[in-house]
Image (tube, coloured by chain):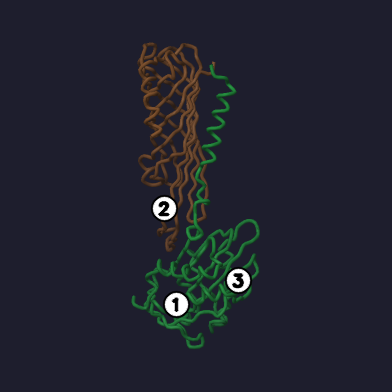
Chain colours: A brown, B green
Amino acid sequence: MKIIRILPFFICILFVSQLNAQKGEVKMNIQYSYALPLGSFKSDVISNGSPRGVTGDILYNVSNKFSVGLGLGFQDFYQKYPRALYNTGDKEVTSAVLSNSVQIIPLLAKAEFYPLGGKPSMVQPYITAGAGLGITSFTQYLGEFGGSNNGGGFMAQGGAGIFVPFKKSGHSGFRLGANYNMVSYNKDGFSNFNNVNFQAGLFFPLK
Amino acid sequence: MISKQFAIAVCTACSAVLFGCTKEPLNNLTQEESRIYTTNSDTTTNFGNYKTYSISDSVAVLDNGQSYKDLKPVDQAYIDAVNKYMQQRGYVLVNKENNPDLGIDVNRIYNTSTGYFSYDDYWDYYGGYWDPYYWGYGGYGYYIPTTYGIYQITQGAVSIDMLDLKNAPSKNKIDIIWNGLARGEGIFNESNADGIVKALFDQSTYLSTNQ
Protein backbone atom coordinates (compact mmCIF):
# COMPACT_ATOMS: atom_id res chain seq x y z
CA MET A 1 0.00 0.00 0.00
CA LYS A 2 2.81 2.37 0.86
CA ILE A 3 4.31 1.92 -2.57
CA ILE A 4 0.99 2.74 -4.23
CA ARG A 5 0.70 5.92 -2.14
CA ILE A 6 4.15 7.21 -3.01
CA LEU A 7 4.07 6.12 -6.65
CA PRO A 8 2.45 9.40 -7.91
CA PHE A 9 5.25 11.30 -6.19
CA PHE A 10 7.86 9.43 -8.21
CA ILE A 11 5.88 9.86 -11.43
CA CYS A 12 5.79 13.61 -10.86
CA ILE A 13 9.52 13.64 -10.38
CA LEU A 14 10.01 11.75 -13.62
CA PHE A 15 8.05 14.31 -15.60
CA VAL A 16 9.41 17.50 -14.17
CA SER A 17 13.00 16.69 -13.61
CA GLN A 18 15.97 17.05 -15.82
CA LEU A 19 19.54 16.23 -15.11
CA ASN A 20 22.24 18.78 -15.11
CA ALA A 21 25.54 16.94 -14.89
CA GLN A 22 27.90 19.82 -14.48
CA LYS A 23 31.43 19.58 -15.74
CA GLY A 24 33.92 19.55 -12.86
CA GLU A 25 31.44 18.26 -10.31
CA VAL A 26 32.41 15.42 -7.96
CA LYS A 27 29.53 13.18 -7.05
CA MET A 28 28.94 10.07 -5.03
CA ASN A 29 26.73 7.06 -5.67
CA ILE A 30 25.61 4.83 -2.80
CA GLN A 31 23.56 1.81 -3.74
CA TYR A 32 22.08 -1.32 -2.29
CA SER A 33 23.03 -4.37 -4.34
CA TYR A 34 21.37 -7.72 -4.97
CA ALA A 35 23.60 -10.16 -6.84
CA LEU A 36 23.08 -13.42 -8.70
CA PRO A 37 25.97 -15.85 -9.25
CA LEU A 38 26.68 -16.92 -12.82
CA GLY A 39 28.49 -19.76 -14.58
CA SER A 40 30.68 -22.07 -12.49
CA PHE A 41 30.20 -19.81 -9.48
CA LYS A 42 26.52 -20.67 -9.63
CA SER A 43 26.89 -24.34 -10.54
CA ASP A 44 29.83 -25.26 -8.30
CA VAL A 45 29.81 -22.90 -5.34
CA ILE A 46 26.67 -20.90 -4.63
CA SER A 47 23.44 -20.82 -6.60
CA ASN A 48 21.50 -18.57 -4.24
CA GLY A 49 21.19 -14.86 -4.91
CA SER A 50 22.80 -12.50 -2.42
CA PRO A 51 20.64 -9.77 -0.86
CA ARG A 52 23.63 -8.51 1.14
CA GLY A 53 25.54 -6.00 -0.90
CA VAL A 54 26.42 -2.34 -1.22
CA THR A 55 28.27 -0.36 -3.84
CA GLY A 56 29.69 3.12 -3.75
CA ASP A 57 31.35 5.30 -6.39
CA ILE A 58 33.06 8.65 -6.32
CA LEU A 59 33.03 10.13 -9.81
CA TYR A 60 34.36 13.31 -11.37
CA ASN A 61 32.35 14.80 -14.21
CA VAL A 62 34.85 15.31 -17.00
CA SER A 63 32.04 16.62 -19.19
CA ASN A 64 28.27 16.58 -19.33
CA LYS A 65 28.44 13.15 -20.90
CA PHE A 66 31.33 11.52 -19.16
CA SER A 67 32.67 10.95 -15.67
CA VAL A 68 35.50 8.91 -14.21
CA GLY A 69 36.37 7.81 -10.72
CA LEU A 70 36.64 4.99 -8.23
CA GLY A 71 34.18 2.29 -7.31
CA LEU A 72 34.05 0.26 -4.10
CA GLY A 73 31.65 -2.36 -2.88
CA PHE A 74 30.89 -5.40 -0.86
CA GLN A 75 28.81 -8.47 -1.64
CA ASP A 76 28.26 -11.45 0.62
CA PHE A 77 27.21 -14.79 -0.89
CA TYR A 78 26.24 -17.76 1.26
CA GLN A 79 24.64 -21.13 0.77
CA LYS A 80 24.15 -24.18 2.93
CA TYR A 81 23.61 -27.47 1.14
CA PRO A 82 21.73 -30.40 2.73
CA ARG A 83 23.72 -33.30 4.15
CA ALA A 84 25.29 -35.40 1.42
CA LEU A 85 28.16 -37.82 0.89
CA TYR A 86 31.49 -36.54 -0.41
CA ASN A 87 34.53 -38.53 -1.46
CA THR A 88 37.26 -37.02 0.69
CA GLY A 89 39.95 -39.58 -0.08
CA ASP A 90 40.70 -42.71 -2.07
CA LYS A 91 38.79 -44.89 0.34
CA GLU A 92 37.23 -42.21 2.43
CA VAL A 93 33.65 -40.99 2.35
CA THR A 94 32.38 -38.10 4.46
CA SER A 95 28.78 -37.24 5.18
CA ALA A 96 28.40 -33.54 5.84
CA VAL A 97 26.37 -30.39 5.47
CA LEU A 98 28.34 -28.23 3.07
CA SER A 99 28.43 -24.46 3.59
CA ASN A 100 29.98 -22.09 1.10
CA SER A 101 30.57 -18.43 1.89
CA VAL A 102 32.04 -15.91 -0.55
CA GLN A 103 32.70 -12.23 -0.01
CA ILE A 104 33.74 -9.97 -2.87
CA ILE A 105 35.13 -6.47 -2.43
CA PRO A 106 35.62 -4.66 -5.76
CA LEU A 107 38.11 -1.83 -5.98
CA LEU A 108 37.66 -0.43 -9.47
CA ALA A 109 38.62 2.42 -11.72
CA LYS A 110 35.32 3.40 -13.31
CA ALA A 111 33.92 5.45 -16.10
CA GLU A 112 30.32 6.42 -16.81
CA PHE A 113 28.84 7.64 -20.06
CA TYR A 114 25.56 9.57 -20.25
CA PRO A 115 24.10 9.44 -23.78
CA LEU A 116 21.67 12.27 -23.00
CA GLY A 117 24.10 14.30 -20.94
CA GLY A 118 23.34 18.01 -21.05
CA LYS A 119 19.92 17.49 -22.62
CA PRO A 120 16.73 18.01 -20.62
CA SER A 121 15.39 14.59 -19.76
CA MET A 122 13.16 13.20 -17.09
CA VAL A 123 15.25 10.05 -16.95
CA GLN A 124 18.94 9.96 -17.65
CA PRO A 125 20.39 6.64 -18.84
CA TYR A 126 23.98 5.72 -18.16
CA ILE A 127 26.47 3.11 -19.29
CA THR A 128 29.26 2.17 -16.95
CA ALA A 129 32.49 0.22 -17.17
CA GLY A 130 35.17 -0.53 -14.62
CA ALA A 131 38.30 -2.56 -14.11
CA GLY A 132 40.58 -3.20 -11.18
CA LEU A 133 41.01 -5.45 -8.21
CA GLY A 134 38.47 -7.91 -6.89
CA ILE A 135 39.33 -8.95 -3.33
CA THR A 136 37.74 -12.30 -2.56
CA SER A 137 37.28 -14.47 0.48
CA PHE A 138 36.04 -18.02 -0.01
CA THR A 139 35.22 -20.14 3.03
CA GLN A 140 34.05 -23.71 2.73
CA TYR A 141 32.85 -25.83 5.62
CA LEU A 142 32.07 -29.52 5.88
CA GLY A 143 29.95 -29.42 8.99
CA GLU A 144 31.80 -27.05 11.27
CA PHE A 145 35.20 -27.87 9.81
CA GLY A 146 36.68 -25.76 7.09
CA GLY A 147 38.92 -22.97 6.12
CA SER A 148 39.22 -19.78 4.14
CA ASN A 149 41.05 -18.79 1.04
CA ASN A 150 41.58 -15.09 0.60
CA GLY A 151 42.91 -13.53 -2.54
CA GLY A 152 42.75 -10.77 -5.03
CA GLY A 153 42.53 -10.82 -8.76
CA PHE A 154 41.47 -8.93 -11.82
CA MET A 155 37.91 -7.74 -11.88
CA ALA A 156 36.03 -6.10 -14.70
CA GLN A 157 32.56 -4.64 -14.72
CA GLY A 158 30.12 -3.41 -17.29
CA GLY A 159 26.63 -2.17 -16.73
CA ALA A 160 23.81 0.19 -17.48
CA GLY A 161 20.97 1.92 -15.74
CA ILE A 162 19.11 5.13 -15.19
CA PHE A 163 19.13 7.95 -12.71
CA VAL A 164 16.43 10.39 -11.82
CA PRO A 165 17.07 13.70 -10.01
CA PHE A 166 14.92 14.61 -7.05
CA LYS A 167 14.03 17.95 -8.66
CA LYS A 168 14.35 19.83 -11.89
CA SER A 169 18.00 20.50 -12.66
CA GLY A 170 18.84 18.63 -9.49
CA HIS A 171 22.26 17.24 -8.76
CA SER A 172 21.06 14.46 -6.54
CA GLY A 173 18.52 11.73 -7.01
CA PHE A 174 17.83 8.04 -7.45
CA ARG A 175 19.84 5.47 -9.38
CA LEU A 176 18.78 2.10 -10.71
CA GLY A 177 21.01 -0.22 -12.65
CA ALA A 178 22.58 -3.59 -13.28
CA ASN A 179 26.18 -4.68 -13.69
CA TYR A 180 27.89 -7.76 -15.01
CA ASN A 181 30.91 -8.50 -12.82
CA MET A 182 33.78 -10.69 -13.94
CA VAL A 183 35.73 -11.67 -10.83
CA SER A 184 38.89 -13.73 -11.31
CA TYR A 185 39.47 -16.56 -8.85
CA ASN A 186 41.54 -19.66 -9.40
CA LYS A 187 42.17 -21.82 -6.35
CA ASP A 188 41.41 -25.41 -5.38
CA GLY A 189 39.73 -26.13 -8.69
CA PHE A 190 37.31 -23.23 -8.47
CA SER A 191 37.38 -20.56 -11.13
CA ASN A 192 35.85 -17.11 -11.29
CA PHE A 193 33.08 -15.70 -9.14
CA ASN A 194 31.23 -13.99 -11.98
CA ASN A 195 27.91 -12.48 -11.09
CA VAL A 196 25.34 -9.94 -12.10
CA ASN A 197 24.14 -7.40 -9.58
CA PHE A 198 21.08 -5.19 -9.55
CA GLN A 199 21.42 -1.99 -7.61
CA ALA A 200 19.32 0.89 -6.41
CA GLY A 201 20.40 3.91 -4.44
CA LEU A 202 21.18 7.59 -4.38
CA PHE A 203 23.59 9.97 -6.03
CA PHE A 204 24.61 13.37 -4.70
CA PRO A 205 27.35 15.92 -5.27
CA LEU A 206 30.32 16.11 -2.95
CA LYS A 207 31.52 19.52 -4.04
CA MET B 1 25.43 20.57 -1.76
CA ILE B 2 25.99 17.62 0.52
CA SER B 3 28.85 17.76 2.96
CA LYS B 4 31.72 15.32 2.99
CA GLN B 5 30.84 14.47 6.58
CA PHE B 6 27.37 13.44 5.45
CA ALA B 7 28.79 11.31 2.65
CA ILE B 8 31.24 9.63 4.99
CA ALA B 9 28.46 8.98 7.48
CA VAL B 10 26.29 7.41 4.77
CA CYS B 11 29.16 5.20 3.59
CA THR B 12 30.04 4.16 7.10
CA ALA B 13 26.44 3.36 7.94
CA CYS B 14 25.96 1.33 4.77
CA SER B 15 29.19 -0.58 5.35
CA ALA B 16 28.37 -1.27 8.99
CA VAL B 17 24.90 -2.54 8.13
CA LEU B 18 26.14 -4.71 5.28
CA PHE B 19 29.14 -6.19 7.07
CA GLY B 20 26.95 -6.78 10.08
CA CYS B 21 24.51 -8.70 7.91
CA THR B 22 27.15 -11.03 6.54
CA LYS B 23 26.04 -14.62 6.91
CA GLU B 24 28.46 -16.41 9.21
CA PRO B 25 28.26 -20.10 8.21
CA LEU B 26 29.01 -21.47 11.67
CA ASN B 27 26.19 -19.45 13.19
CA ASN B 28 23.75 -21.01 10.75
CA LEU B 29 24.39 -24.65 11.64
CA THR B 30 22.37 -26.78 14.01
CA GLN B 31 24.25 -29.15 16.28
CA GLU B 32 23.41 -32.03 13.94
CA GLU B 33 24.51 -30.09 10.89
CA SER B 34 27.84 -29.30 12.53
CA ARG B 35 28.79 -32.96 12.62
CA ILE B 36 30.66 -34.87 9.95
CA TYR B 37 30.72 -38.63 9.61
CA THR B 38 33.72 -40.12 7.86
CA THR B 39 34.26 -43.75 6.93
CA ASN B 40 37.33 -45.47 5.57
CA SER B 41 37.23 -48.98 4.27
CA ASP B 42 39.52 -51.50 2.69
CA THR B 43 37.93 -51.77 -0.73
CA THR B 44 39.50 -55.19 -1.31
CA THR B 45 37.62 -56.65 1.63
CA ASN B 46 34.44 -58.62 1.12
CA PHE B 47 32.61 -58.00 4.34
CA GLY B 48 30.30 -60.89 3.56
CA ASN B 49 33.14 -63.25 4.37
CA TYR B 50 32.83 -62.36 8.04
CA LYS B 51 29.99 -63.67 10.17
CA THR B 52 30.84 -63.11 13.80
CA TYR B 53 32.21 -60.22 15.76
CA SER B 54 33.15 -59.19 19.25
CA ILE B 55 33.24 -55.69 20.64
CA SER B 56 35.38 -54.32 23.43
CA ASP B 57 33.61 -53.86 26.75
CA SER B 58 35.02 -50.38 27.26
CA VAL B 59 36.41 -47.59 25.14
CA ALA B 60 39.89 -46.24 24.80
CA VAL B 61 40.11 -42.58 25.69
CA LEU B 62 42.88 -40.60 24.07
CA ASP B 63 43.16 -37.37 25.93
CA ASN B 64 46.01 -35.05 25.03
CA GLY B 65 48.53 -37.82 24.61
CA GLN B 66 47.24 -39.87 27.54
CA SER B 67 45.26 -43.05 26.97
CA TYR B 68 43.10 -45.06 29.33
CA LYS B 69 40.03 -47.26 29.28
CA ASP B 70 36.66 -45.96 30.37
CA LEU B 71 32.99 -46.85 30.29
CA LYS B 72 30.78 -43.83 30.79
CA PRO B 73 27.10 -43.88 29.76
CA VAL B 74 28.03 -42.30 26.44
CA ASP B 75 30.58 -45.07 25.84
CA GLN B 76 28.00 -47.73 26.58
CA ALA B 77 25.58 -45.94 24.24
CA TYR B 78 28.10 -46.19 21.41
CA ILE B 79 28.82 -49.85 22.16
CA ASP B 80 25.09 -50.60 22.23
CA ALA B 81 24.53 -48.76 18.96
CA VAL B 82 27.36 -50.60 17.22
CA ASN B 83 25.91 -53.90 18.43
CA LYS B 84 22.49 -52.89 17.15
CA TYR B 85 23.61 -51.97 13.66
CA MET B 86 26.10 -54.82 13.32
CA GLN B 87 23.36 -57.27 14.12
CA GLN B 88 20.97 -55.53 11.73
CA ARG B 89 23.56 -56.25 9.04
CA GLY B 90 23.58 -59.92 9.96
CA TYR B 91 26.69 -60.18 12.11
CA VAL B 92 26.54 -62.35 15.20
CA LEU B 93 27.98 -61.15 18.48
CA VAL B 94 30.23 -63.72 20.14
CA ASN B 95 32.55 -63.66 23.09
CA LYS B 96 36.05 -62.67 22.12
CA GLU B 97 37.30 -66.05 23.34
CA ASN B 98 35.17 -67.74 20.66
CA ASN B 99 37.35 -66.65 17.75
CA PRO B 100 35.25 -63.82 16.31
CA ASP B 101 35.86 -62.97 12.66
CA LEU B 102 35.83 -59.27 13.48
CA GLY B 103 36.89 -57.24 16.47
CA ILE B 104 35.46 -53.79 17.10
CA ASP B 105 37.07 -51.06 19.18
CA VAL B 106 35.42 -47.78 20.14
CA ASN B 107 37.59 -44.79 20.95
CA ARG B 108 36.96 -41.37 22.40
CA ILE B 109 39.51 -38.78 21.34
CA TYR B 110 40.04 -35.39 22.91
CA ASN B 111 42.34 -32.56 22.19
CA THR B 112 41.80 -29.81 24.68
CA SER B 113 45.22 -28.27 24.17
CA THR B 114 46.01 -25.70 21.56
CA GLY B 115 47.10 -26.79 18.14
CA TYR B 116 46.09 -29.86 16.32
CA PHE B 117 45.79 -33.55 16.92
CA SER B 118 47.19 -35.62 14.14
CA TYR B 119 45.71 -38.98 13.39
CA ASP B 120 49.20 -40.18 12.58
CA ASP B 121 49.81 -40.22 16.33
CA TYR B 122 46.60 -42.11 16.84
CA TRP B 123 47.59 -44.92 14.52
CA ASP B 124 51.28 -44.93 15.51
CA TYR B 125 50.46 -45.95 19.06
CA TYR B 126 47.39 -48.07 18.35
CA GLY B 127 49.04 -51.21 19.79
CA GLY B 128 49.66 -49.30 22.99
CA TYR B 129 46.06 -48.75 23.85
CA TRP B 130 44.66 -51.81 22.08
CA ASP B 131 47.24 -54.49 22.80
CA PRO B 132 46.77 -57.30 20.25
CA TYR B 133 46.90 -59.59 23.27
CA TYR B 134 43.41 -58.36 24.10
CA TRP B 135 42.21 -60.04 20.93
CA GLY B 136 44.14 -63.22 21.64
CA TYR B 137 47.03 -62.39 19.32
CA GLY B 138 49.74 -61.32 21.72
CA GLY B 139 52.91 -60.26 19.97
CA TYR B 140 51.19 -59.37 16.73
CA GLY B 141 51.33 -55.89 15.31
CA TYR B 142 48.62 -53.92 13.58
CA TYR B 143 48.79 -53.14 9.90
CA ILE B 144 47.41 -49.69 9.23
CA PRO B 145 46.74 -48.92 5.56
CA THR B 146 48.41 -45.67 4.63
CA THR B 147 45.14 -44.23 3.38
CA TYR B 148 43.75 -44.15 6.88
CA GLY B 149 43.23 -40.76 8.39
CA ILE B 150 45.52 -37.86 8.60
CA TYR B 151 42.93 -35.64 10.22
CA GLN B 152 43.60 -32.66 12.33
CA ILE B 153 41.37 -32.61 15.37
CA THR B 154 40.65 -29.46 17.28
CA GLN B 155 37.74 -30.57 19.42
CA GLY B 156 37.28 -34.28 19.68
CA ALA B 157 36.18 -37.36 17.85
CA VAL B 158 34.61 -40.73 18.30
CA SER B 159 36.29 -43.44 16.30
CA ILE B 160 35.04 -46.98 15.68
CA ASP B 161 37.54 -49.47 14.26
CA MET B 162 36.79 -52.85 12.73
CA LEU B 163 39.61 -55.37 12.92
CA ASP B 164 40.12 -58.43 10.73
CA LEU B 165 40.70 -61.18 13.28
CA LYS B 166 39.69 -63.94 10.90
CA ASN B 167 42.78 -63.55 8.75
CA ALA B 168 45.14 -62.41 11.48
CA PRO B 169 46.79 -65.84 11.97
CA SER B 170 47.58 -66.22 8.28
CA LYS B 171 48.79 -62.65 7.89
CA ASN B 172 50.57 -62.35 11.21
CA LYS B 173 48.95 -58.97 11.63
CA ILE B 174 45.57 -57.47 12.39
CA ASP B 175 44.22 -55.46 9.49
CA ILE B 176 41.92 -52.59 10.30
CA ILE B 177 39.40 -52.99 7.52
CA TRP B 178 36.88 -50.30 8.42
CA ASN B 179 36.94 -47.12 10.44
CA GLY B 180 34.11 -44.77 11.26
CA LEU B 181 34.78 -41.34 12.63
CA ALA B 182 32.38 -38.72 13.99
CA ARG B 183 33.36 -35.15 14.71
CA GLY B 184 31.45 -32.02 15.60
CA GLU B 185 29.02 -30.78 18.21
CA GLY B 186 27.28 -33.24 20.51
CA ILE B 187 29.28 -36.35 19.68
CA PHE B 188 29.88 -37.00 23.37
CA ASN B 189 26.19 -36.68 24.13
CA GLU B 190 24.72 -40.06 24.99
CA SER B 191 21.46 -39.35 23.21
CA ASN B 192 23.25 -38.74 19.91
CA ALA B 193 25.24 -41.99 19.85
CA ASP B 194 22.63 -44.11 18.09
CA GLY B 195 22.07 -41.58 15.31
CA ILE B 196 25.79 -41.11 14.77
CA VAL B 197 26.49 -44.85 14.52
CA LYS B 198 23.46 -45.23 12.25
CA ALA B 199 24.86 -42.55 9.94
CA LEU B 200 28.22 -44.31 9.79
CA PHE B 201 26.54 -47.59 8.90
CA ASP B 202 24.15 -45.96 6.44
CA GLN B 203 27.07 -44.70 4.38
CA SER B 204 28.74 -48.15 4.56
CA THR B 205 26.18 -50.32 2.83
CA TYR B 206 28.89 -52.90 2.11
CA LEU B 207 28.98 -53.78 5.84
CA SER B 208 26.78 -56.84 5.59
CA THR B 209 27.00 -60.60 5.79
CA ASN B 210 24.96 -60.71 2.57
CA GLN B 211 27.69 -59.62 0.19
Residue B150: % across, % down? 53, 61
Question: Which of the 4 image quadrants contains residue A177?
Answer: top left
Residue at the spot of label 1: B84
Residue A179: % across, % down? 39, 30
Residue B175: % across, % down? 48, 74
Q: Secondary structure at mark 2?
A: strand
The C terminus of chain B - image quarter: bottom left
Residues packed near mark 1 inside 10 Å, few (<14), some (14 to 19) or many (20 plus): some
- Chain of the residue displaying label 3: B
- Using residue A1 as the reference point, say whether residue B103 is left or right of it: right
Residue A19: % across, % down? 41, 15
B10 relative to A122, above or below:
below
The residue nearer to you, when weighing B184 against A190, is: B184
A104 relative to B140, above or below:
above
Residue at the spot of label 3: B61
Instruction: Give the amino acid at mark 2.
Output: Tyr
Is disc 2 on the same chain as disc 1? no
Callouts 1 and 2 close, C-beta under 8 Å: no
Instruction: Give the amino acid at mark 3.
Output: Val
- Chain of the residue displaying label 2: A
- Chain of the residue displaying label 1: B
Residues packed near mark 2 inside 10 Å, few (<14), some (14 to 19) or many (20 plus): few
Residue A81, which numbered label? 2
